[in-house]
Every structure is written in C-alpha cells, then in structure tokens.
Image: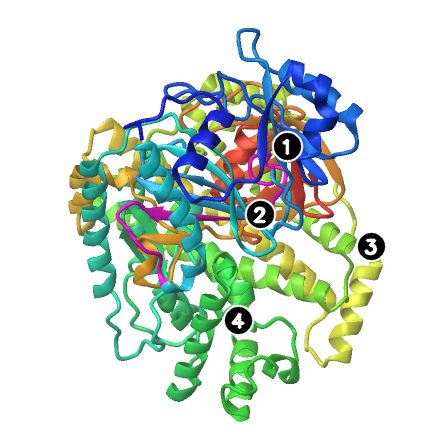
Amino acid sequence: MNNRLSYGNKAKNLEYVAKNTDIEIPYFKEIYLNDLNNIENIIDSFSQKIMIRSNSSLEDKEYSSSAGKYLSIGPIERKDLETIKKSWKMVVGSYEKQANQSVIFQNYIENAKSVSVLTSYKVGSDSAYRTFSTYRGPETDAITSGKYSEIKNFFMHRSLDILPEKYEKYNVYLKIITQLEELFKNKQLDIEMVLDENNSPQLLQVRPLMGKKLDKESIFDEKNVINRNLKKYKKLNKTTADRFGTNQIYSNMSDMNPAEMIGKKPDNIAFGLYKFMFTDTTWNIQRGEFGYRNYSGGKLMELLNNVAYINVNHSLNSFLTRNLQKESCEEIINYQLNKLKENPHLHDSIEFDISRSSYVFDTVKEFSKEYKNIIDPNELIQWHNDLVQIDTKNKSTLEKNKKIILSTFSKLNKSFQYSKKENIKLIRDTMALPFTHHSRLGFVYFAQLNSLLKKEVISEDQKKLLLLSVKSISTKMKADAYEVKIGKKTLDGFLDVYGHIRAGNYNLSSSNLKNNLNFTESLINNSETPMEDNILPKDIFTNIEKYFITNKISLKASTWINMFQEGISTRENSKFYYTKGIDGILNEIGEKNISDRELFDLLDIEFNEENTSDMRLKNVLMPDLITSNEDFYFYEEMSKNGNYIGQGTINGDVLLINYEANRPKNLDNKIVVIPAADPGWDWIFNYKIKSLITKYGGPNSHMAIRCAEHNIPAILGVGENNFTVITNSKSLEIDFSNESFSNV
C-alpha cells in the first residue's frame, strides 16, 4: 500500500478504497465516450436505476478542489439509453477543456434509509471537529444541494474516540471516517455515504478537503481548553437553598438571549456591559418587582468556551409565583427541565413552550391540563390565580417604569459623563431595569395575542392587523426620515433624536448613525411617504369582547387592545431610550481608550482573562444548548429552520450585511441577511427590502415585532447551518406558508 494516495478523480479514489478496505461501495464503472457505443451491454451489469456522477480529473486533487462544481445526474432508469447518453454528454460538458473525458456510472441505492456527508474537520474553520450531516431519506443530494431543511448536523471533537451513549447509533459514521483517514493518511476528507434499507453503510465518494492541516498539537490544545471549561461547568452544578430542580441546562437563546443581543462569542466589552446591565442582578430584581417570587438566584449568564449561556434553571425558577409550596416548585421545575431536555429545539422559546410565566386567558381547567398529574389540584388553582393577579398590575408597571426611564433619558445630554461609575450604575438602575419590565410586558401581550389566535378568537389576518396597529419609535423614525428628505425637518434634528442607533448595540466597533453620515444620508434619501394609520375592524373588538364575556374575564376588548398596543410599543421605545445610554458609554470607552480590564474594574466584575489571552478559544465549537458533560465534545446542532413571519411566496437577490462590512447604500428589493435580530439594525426598514433573514432571533424578538409592524416578511433565527447556506446563495425563494426556502 502506498504511504499516501495521489488524488485524481472519484473513480480512482473509490477503486483505491475498494482494493484496500472492506467498506462497501455501490457497483460503479468509469465510462468514456467510446463506451457509449457499447452502452447497452455495459448497462446490463447495473441495477434498475443508475446515477451518473462527475469524474473530472480536476475535481479531487490533493491541493485543489472543485467539489460540487460539476454535474451529477440521476437516478435514471437503466433501460432509458437515450437519457443515459445525453446525461453523459451533459456531465462531461460541465468540465473544463483540459479535464479527462469520463464519468462514473453507479448503482442507485433504492430505499436508502439516510444519506450523509462526513468531513474530517469543520469546513470554513480551523476547528478540529469531525462533522456528520445526515438526512433521513434516499435523496443523495439532500445535503450538498442545500435544498432540504430536515438535515441533522453533529460535531465531534477529534480527541474523542467513541461517541456518547445517547449517540451510539452514529458510530457507523465514526468508523467509516476514521478508517478512510487512516487509509489515505489524511485528516482532511470529505465523504459521502448512504445507509441502505438494511442499515448497511455504502460509500459514494471520498475526496480531500482543502484547508488548514490538522496536527496532534492543535487537537491537544483544543482539548485542554475544553476540559478547563468542562471543569467550570461541573462546578456550576452546585445548587442553592431556594433553587429547585436537579438538572443543569444552559442555553444561548433563552431568557435574556445573549446570542441575539451580544453575539454567540462576545468580546469582553459586550459581555461585560451586558453582564453588568442585566444578567448579574437586574434580571432577578425585575422578576421580584414584577410579582414573581423573591428568589436569591445568582448570575444568569456564564461564559463556557467563550460562548455566553443563560442558566435555564435560574430562569425557570425566577418565574415561579409567590404562593406556591416548595414541594410544588420542585416538581414544576424538574418537569420543565426534563421537558426541555427531551425537546431541546424549544430552548429559544421556553417562555412560550416550557415555563408558565404569564396569564394567557386560560381557565383553571385549561391551565391545569399539563400539570394535573404533577402537582396538587389546589396548587394549580393557586398558581393560576397568582398569574391572574400579576396580570392586573400591568398598567401600573408600565406607567411607573416609563416615568423612570424617561427621567434619566432626559439627562443624557452632551455634558453627561457616561463612563463615570455612578452614571453607569444610573443607566443600569433607571434604564436597564425599566426596560426589562417593559420587555416582560411585551412578552406577556405577545403571548396573549398568540393565545387568542390559538383559541380561534381572532384569525391570522386579524393578528396581522393588530400588529400593524402598533406604532413605536421605529414607525416615527421612518416618518421623520421622510420629513428630512422633503425639507420639513433638518438632518441635525434627526441625528439629535436617532443618532445613537447602531447595529450591534454592544459592539464598540459598530458606528452609530451620527458617525456614519454618508450612510445616514442614504437612509434618508431612500425613505418613503409614511403609511396612513389603519382603523381596526369592529369585528376584532366584537370577537374579543364576546370571548371575555363567555369566559368571565373582567376586561373590555378595547382596554386589552389599547394595553396590547402600548405594551408592545413601550417595549420598543424603552429599548430606544436605554440604548442611548449604552451608545454613550461605548463612545467614551473609545474616546478615552478605556481598556477591557479597566472597564471590568470600573464595574466591579471579574475580568474574563481567558477571552483575552487564549486565542485557541476561537476554534472551539459549542452547542446552543448544554444538557450534560458530553455536549462539550459531541453535540447535535439544533434542528432550527427559523421563525417565519409573513405569508405567501417571495424570491429575490440575497444581500448579506455584517458588522465588519460597509453598509450598502441601497437595500431596495433585496432579501437582507444579518447576523442577529438585534433592533440596532432598525435602519434597514427605511429601505424597500423584500425580506429579512437572521441567524439568531426568536418569535418574540424585537425584530419580530418590527417586521410585523412594517409588514416585512422575515425568517428569524435560521441557525448556523441554514445561515451558511443562505449567505452562500445568490438568490432565494421563500415559501412563508410552508416555512421553507430554496436556492433559485
């Protein structure tokens, strides 16, 4: 056996595997132009259906690759000789002129259980993780084409020799990839395989991957980093006297949503500010003031391998009500944690699908359904009544915190010293805290709106009208931009109000509108005449009123609709007010050249030394949800297709905008793609965009509200894998009714 294969084409690679391993390969043959004269005899040795695969000599070289560049066609009926000949010519026609003139005929695997692509490391990165992508079905192009959404992705660190017990059925992939890596003496392979109807692995192709060479030292270094953070995670399992539940689960998109607000791997400035403003103490103070039980809690957010995570146990505990008995609390939290563990895809919607944190117009009977076998019936009644009681305080909570935040907002003038310790605390206590109250109210009213839809009190169209009736600061910004355009308002006046808005509210390198005048002027020039206010149809009021009367809910439809509009808009307005404080802090950090460590010392929080000194962290992958020690080394990517907002079908060109890129001058008629559903991107609504897509963002995110308000169809939170597919696409067709997208 040669020490290393000189790569050529698919046929040579498969022949090499066939001669030197016991790996099964569907029958194949390299077919040249002359073979077409005898195709009828040649084809007799194949099964009823065949695949015609590209076999270019330029496709699978060791130091260059054209993977996916050339055609493959099939399956084709063996008897259809005319199509076979035509397909041969089409495949060869996709090669460069200097390439060999042959293709591969290969038996098509009928009734395949699954198709998989295995890579020796994470493509597009220097991370030492084997990647398994699997699709349950016979379509052999399911993964490579990007047309299919039901794909499972697994990431396994190369230091792991065997899969965790819960994933042991995937050991077949590990066996294939390790066997081929050993055969080719190469830790950079791209492998396609299927499991046939008997669950037997069948190799379709193997080729080299282009990228950084992996070595034992880098793998060992990453392992040390992971072990250090795993040790930290184990220490966090310790509980407190008033915290219920036994599991320890961390999510990057639950509760305060760090992946959405500061990024999955935030820098020190973003992490430190968000930690100080919200996740160390503010989150817990807010829950107590809102009416939930008094809970000592602890730090809501932690860094593990430099990924910001929310302690789900803390979050769920903070939403328990005050009159529940300890025994009931223990049962409730354990049930909720186990439900999340069994349904990990719900981690970004725990307040909709896991916890019971708000009253959504359900009767005691409805409320009790899920928990009737978990806690005492009397406790269920008490729990329900507690949430009803909290709901009665919504208006006073809204008004009280509006006054507090506006009072401080009025002080944020040119003489305000944002980076003084007492002023940073003032912004936290009188802006961040009121904002969290308004955020909670926004969630409550959005949950109640969805409840009315689910109960068929209102229709989908009526829900849309209610959302369109919300007039927040975003609507006013669009109107004011148009006023500047037509000369009724000045640019300076516009910037005095909106100049602090920046994409990435906690991103020091992101420019605000005041510091990016070329972009701001472009934004204004592209603004349009504001839409006229729509009067809500009477039947919406009638339907809601009838439901309230029937279910003895002591609310008037008009009262609830007014509070719904005010609750949603106030949340968005509060975010606008609060972020002026954050923008001021970031500006002074930049002007005074305040270091990361100086900021952490100023805020009296522990400095994240690891993020600053250990650059190996950037290559360590982490799941969106941690449920056990095993997830640090092997995990399944969340099955995340995104939260779809809108109906019908659209298609258009894709335009990616990220923090580093210059902002384009024209977004009109584009499907705009951004990293997160961060309201700092609000300026995009001044353009006539076709749609918005984000990597992160849930159904109750700020951008979800804004998209609904502006009637912009969107997919929020598509996840990393889909985001990569989308950003590599020139154009997309999005079917909002069926919640799917495809390249066009």
Q: Nearer the viewer, mark 3 or mark 2?
A: 2
Specify the label residue 393 is tagged with: 4
Question: Helix or strand or loop: what does disc 2 sit on?
Answer: loop
Question: Helix or strand or loop: what does disc 4 sit on?
Answer: loop
Q: Quadrant of residue 26?
A: top right
Q: Position of residue 425 (x, y in %)?
A: 27, 51
Return the disc, 3 or 1, that comes first in the chain's sequence. 1
In the foreground, 629 or 418: 629
Estimate the spatial distance between the alpha carbons at disc 3 and disc 1, rounded to whole Å. Answer: 24 Å
Residue 322 is one of the magenta-drawn residues? no
Estimate the spatial distance between the alpha carbons at disc 3 and disc 4, rounded to whole Å. Answer: 28 Å
Question: Helix or strand or loop: what does disc 1 sit on?
Answer: helix
Which residue is drawn at the image coordinates 49% and 88% (left, top)?
Answer: 375
Residue stretch rendered in magenta on the structure: 141-164
Question: Helix or strand or loop: what does disc 3 sit on?
Answer: loop
In the foreground, 485 or 726: 726
Specify the label residue 642 is tagged with: 2
Return the disc, 2 or 1, that comes first in the chain's sequence. 1
Mark 3 sits on what residue?
Answer: 537
- At label 4, counting other C-alpha atoms closer than 10 Å, the crowd grade (few under 14, some 14-19, many 20 or more) is few
Which residue is drawn at the image coordinates 24% and 57% (left, top)?
Answer: 230
Estimate the spatial distance between the alpha carbons at disc 3 and disc 2, rounded to whole Å. Answer: 31 Å
Return the disc, 4 or 2, that comes first in the chain's sequence. 4
Q: Amino acid at mark 2?
A: Gly
Mark 1 sits on what residue?
Answer: 479
Q: Position of residue 650 (x, y in %)?
A: 72, 34
Estimate the spatial distance between the alpha carbons at disc 1 and disc 4, rounded to whole Å. Answer: 33 Å
Q: Is residue 529 left or right of residue 116?
A: right
Q: Nearer the viewer, mark 3 or mark 1?
A: 3
Estimate the spatial distance between the alpha carbons at disc 2 and disc 1, rounded to whole Å. Answer: 30 Å
